[in-house]
Image (cartoon, grey):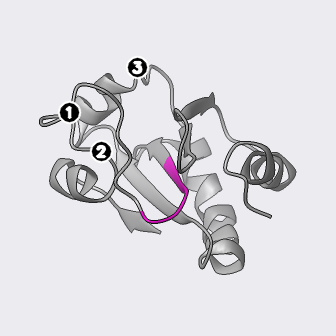
Amino acid sequence: MEHLTKETFKEKVFNFEENKEWKFKGDKPSVIKFGAEWCSPCKSLEPLLEELNNEYGSKINIYDIDVDEEFELAGMFGVQSIPSILFIPMDEQPQMSMGALSKDTFVKAFNDVLKVD
């Protein structure tokens, strides 16, 4: 799971300084976990996200953003509670989910939102 900064977010996901309308820059659907070091539910998601990354890594990108370090990115997506999970399909608008999700919920979102099985 790759940690994103503002600069790497602009390169790999969306350059919000150049574009007003959403324009995904990725080469495959992506998932971003917004969390923080001090957040227990966020930490509990890490092994699950690593497992999903091992299973789906050739089909999706899984990223992590620390809201304490990258508050501008968190604010841009309206993150008010963590963990928050952003699902980014290739050709549609991203969808946000709040809270720690189960593996079944992630797999369903991969199928339904990201169109990956």
Q: Position of residue 90 (x, y in %)?
A: 53, 51
Q: Position of residue 81 (x, y in %)?
A: 50, 24
Residue numbers of the magenta segment: 27-32
Question: Disc 3 vs disc 1: Cβ atoms closer than 8 Å?
Answer: no
Left or right side of 38 for 11: left
Quadrant in which residue 40 is drawn: top right
Label 3: which secondary element: loop
Badge 3 crowding class, 10 Å Cα cut-off, few under 14, some 14 to 19, many 20 or more, is few
Of label 3 and label 2, which has the lower sequence position? 2
Horizontal arrangement in the rendering, residue 108 relative to residue 63 (left or right): right
Residue occupying the point 12% across, 35% down: 17
Say the numbered circle drawn on residue 14.
2
Q: Please report the residue visible at 67 percent of the width from the left and 50 percent of the height from the top.
A: 114
Residue picked out by circle 3: 78
Q: Secondary structure at mark 2?
A: loop
User: Which one is closest to the eye, mark 3 or mark 1?
Assistant: 1
Is the residue under label 2 in contact with that under label 1 (CB below 8 Å)?
yes
Report the residue at 61% width, 43% height from top: 41
Q: Amino acid at mark 1?
A: Asn
**Residue where numbered disc 1 is placed:** 19
Is 1 rendered above or below residue 18?
A: below
Mark toward the viewer: 3 or 2: 2
